[in-house]
Structure formats: C-alpha cells, structure tokens
Image (spheres, rainbow, N blue to C red):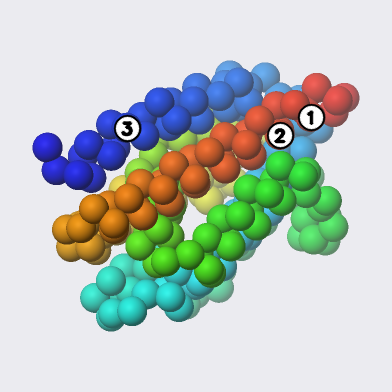
Amino acid sequence: MEFLQKLQGELRAGINEILEHPFLKRIKNAELSKKQLRFFVEQYHIYNSYFPRLLAALAANITDDQTRIPIIENLWEEHGSGVLKHSHRVLFERFAKAVGLEKEDLDQVEPLSTTSICCEHLLETCMQDDFITSLGALGPGTEYFTNDEYQLIVDGLSKYDFLSKEDLEFWVVHISLDEDHYEDMLEVIRPWCTTAENRHKVKVGAKKAIDLEILFWDGLEDAVDQIK
C-alpha cells in the first residue's frame, strides 16, 4: 500500500474524533442558540484568518517551484483569485454579519486559549519547521477531511431560518474547492516521500495538525454552555 494511503488510514481515528466531536454535533443538529452560534463564529473567524498566513509561510519555505505552485494557487483562491469581494475572508464576514456580527466585532474578538494555541502552533509549524512537515500538516492533516467537516457544518447551518443560501457561501465554496486542493497537494507531497525521514516528517505534521484541531473544538465545547 502506498505510504499516503496508509497514512490516511492511520489518521482516521483522529479525523473521526473531529467529525464526531460533540461541538460539531451541536452545529449539525442546530442545537446552538443564536448567541452560542455567534460564539462559534467569533472563534472560527480567528482560525479562518490564520489560514492564508499558514499557506504563505509554507510557500515561503518551499525550495522548488513545482512544489510551491499548488500552495500559491490555493493562497490566490483564498483571496478571491484577485477579486476582493470573492475573498474567503469577505465571504466569512458576510456569514458573520448574518448572525449579528459586524467586521468591527470580529476585530475585537478575544480568542480562547485553546484557539490561540491551535492557531499559533500551526503558524509556528509552517514558519519554522521543514516544509515537508508543513505539507503534512496542511495536506493530510487538514485538507484531507475539510469537505466532510464543512458539509456537516452546512447541513446544520441550513436548519437556521435566519441564514440564507447566500449567507453560507463561505462554507459551500470550500466544499467545492478543497477536494481539488487536497489532490493537488498529494501530487506535490508524493515525490518527497521516497525516504523514511521525509515520510516521518509528513506523518508528524499531519498528526500535529489533527491534534491541534481537536484542541480547538474541545475549547469550544468546554466553553459553550457558559454562553446563555
């Protein structure tokens, strides 16, 4: 069995822990009050705002053009392929506004400690670790299951009558794009997996990203019942 296929199997327990997380179940079942939903949006805004920085840091550390190109393409799409109104940050702000949060509100959000740890450690990985480790973090450790994760979120958010299909564009766009992003990332990771050292780096990065995302969701679950 190819290394990356085997790795996906090894990661499945952690991925399932995310996809079956109690907080994601609250979203999927539309169990969050509007105030609790705003709390989720505030914290996810922080997580989301880091993602272009992760891609940029990874791209800066990649040593060859062929490996870098799909990362740059992903980063370009994050910025609406040059059209600001299609930027994923703008789409998220539109979604946030639908739950009662203006851009000024988002700018003043205080992250939970778990949100900060998740985001800062991912950024540190992409800035300071070997780029092969970072490819593992953002590929098998993130993009591999984003489609499934976002579909759960869309299914739940669609149950709120104050959210329109247009309000959910941020989530729907990622469902349509991230499968391609992951396939592109596999293509650039695969040539680097010819040595045991590099395979270990990919695995370390992927497991680290999954563990950090579990921490992110754990933080939300621990705090949400205090939001009345």
Q: Depth check: give the residue in front, 223 or 41.
A: 223
Q: Residue at x 19, y 44 (%)?
A: 3
Give how far apart the Cα atoms at labels 1 and 2 are.
6 Å
| Residue 16: image location, x then y, percent | 43, 26
Asked if residue 16 lies left or right of residue 65, the reply is right
Q: Depth check: give the residue in front, 113 or 98.
A: 113
Q: Secondary structure at mark 2?
A: helix
Name the mark nearer the viewer: 3 or 2. 3
| Residue 20: image location, x then y, percent | 50, 22
> Which residue in the protein does label 1 denote?
223
* Type of amino acid at the residue the image marks with label 1: Ala
> Which residue in the protein does label 2 denote?
219
Mark seen at residue 10: 3
Q: Are marks 1 and 2 in contact (CB under 8 Å)?
A: yes
Name the mark nearer the viewer: 3 or 1. 3
Q: Earlier in the sequence, mark 3 or mark 2?
A: 3
Mark seen at residue 145: none
Q: Secondary structure at mark 1?
A: helix
Query: Can I make out residue 186 in this image?
Result: no
